[in-house]
Amino acid sequence: MDGRAALTEAAVRDRLSSCLAELLLMERVPDDFDLISNGSLNSSMFLALLVELEDRFDIQISGTDMNPENFQTLDRMTQFVCAKRTES
Amino acid sequence: MGEPFSVTGCTPADYADIADIQEGLLAGGRDGNLAYLKWKYGANPYLDDRYTVLARSGGAGGGDLIGMVGVFGSCWEAGGQRFVLPCLTDTIVAPEYRNSSAFHDMVDTVLELLRRDGVPWLLDFGDQGTIPSMLVRGWRMVGPWAQSALTRPEGFRPPAAWEEVPPSSGANSGVLLRATPGADLDAMVAVARGVPQDGRVRVVRDRAYFTWRAANPLARYYYLVAGGEEPQGYLVAHRSGVDTDEGPTPTTIVECEARTDEVFADLVLAAHERLPGRRVVMGTRDVCRAGLDVLTSLGADIVQPTGRFTRDRPLPNLIIRDTGTAGVLAELAGLLEPEVWDFRGVTGRGWR
């Protein structure tokens, strides 16, 4: 791979949205849908989500990344992925 | 969203239902699973089943058992004090409820009970698959740490049955090593007591603990002791009690404690030469240089954590949750820091 492909925030959001919709069997995931409090993402889904994020966005996720601020909603996850993509 | 359920406490009257729902994990049959539950929660020297939580289908009062979050007691020591810390264990949710909040509702109930009783921390050394979803709910990660794995050739059989292995002198220390048919409590207690604390938090290994652990009805243990009248070290390895020697589960060296690094290395070497199982694994976080050298010389694969969640899943781990109670003992205040923990003598899940 010749470096990381450029992605706008909107493109990240679109890809994340379709990824989450697939996992949650929903047609569309609202930007502020709470993914943690209502138990929507069970343990195996969460693990699958991490693998998808690493693969689709070419990022590496560590234990310290795993907090509600980064994963509570599609909005926050978009911010998190965009920040990770600028890290290295 | 999803089928309704209610969260309840646990009493021995629930054990028959638990034995059935846990068969997929424990595989001990109803009688074996019941014996395991009575041992784990009824005979544990530190804690009974008061914090174990169940989920049942339907509303209040409940119907069929659809989930369990077990909590058992482990005892630790630091600064000359001992304290019991509860550990999550035996967690299960019925397949039709895995897309519900059942698991996290049960864990939240456990945390409420602990907070009510002033218990500051809940530990989990368990299934890596649940860790990401727990971390985003306030758990913190202390691990993971490195693990050694020695894979034997297909068809490997140890040179002799464990109890028939003749005593031999350790190559590094010259100390006599002998396999014992059961836990040599006097020797093991003496060795554990003889290794000084270094200020970190370590698991208590006393007569009550060794006696309880050895009674696990769904486990097979293998014991090595170094030395005679003045014991110099011991090693404990574990295999599933419901698997054969040739079966797929690994053999885990759960404890190795010694007064010197040479004796430690001799115990590790002897165990890897004699234990049954296609794979022999042990955590290497606090293993001494001599022990690591033995593992390397045997061709063991020592896997280090990468810091990436998706890669580190198979490694031993510890996550911990602050229950939010006030007035935590000073010795317990820093448990979120990895360097606070002393796993020198405990290379597997030795505390259960």
Image: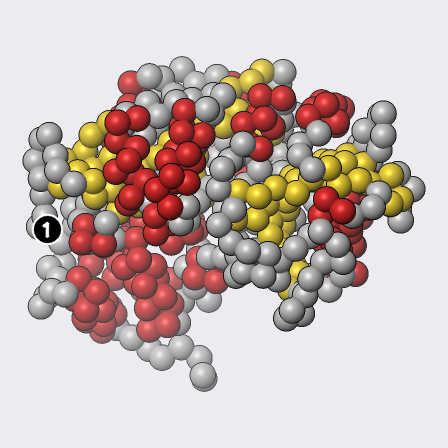
Local secondary structure at mark 1: loop
Does residue B209 show up?
yes
Residue extending farthest right: B174
A39 displayed left or right of B126: left
Query: Residue B237 in the image: x percent, y percent?
Result: 64, 44
Does residue B333 show up?
no
Closer to the camera in the image, A37 or B315: B315
The residue located at (43%, 61%) in the rendering is: B310
**Snapshot quadrant of residue A81:** bottom left
Closer to the camera in the image, A9 or A60: A60
The residue located at (54%, 21%) in the rendering is: B331
**Snapshot quadrant of residue B259:** top right
Position above or below: B212 against A32? above
Amino acid found under the numbered disc labelled 1:
Gly
Position above or below: B311 against B166? below
Query: Residue B278 in the image: x percent, y percent?
Result: 62, 62
Other-residue count near label 1 (Cα within 10 Å), few / some / many at <14 / 14–19 / ≥20:
few
Position above or below: B247 against A56? above
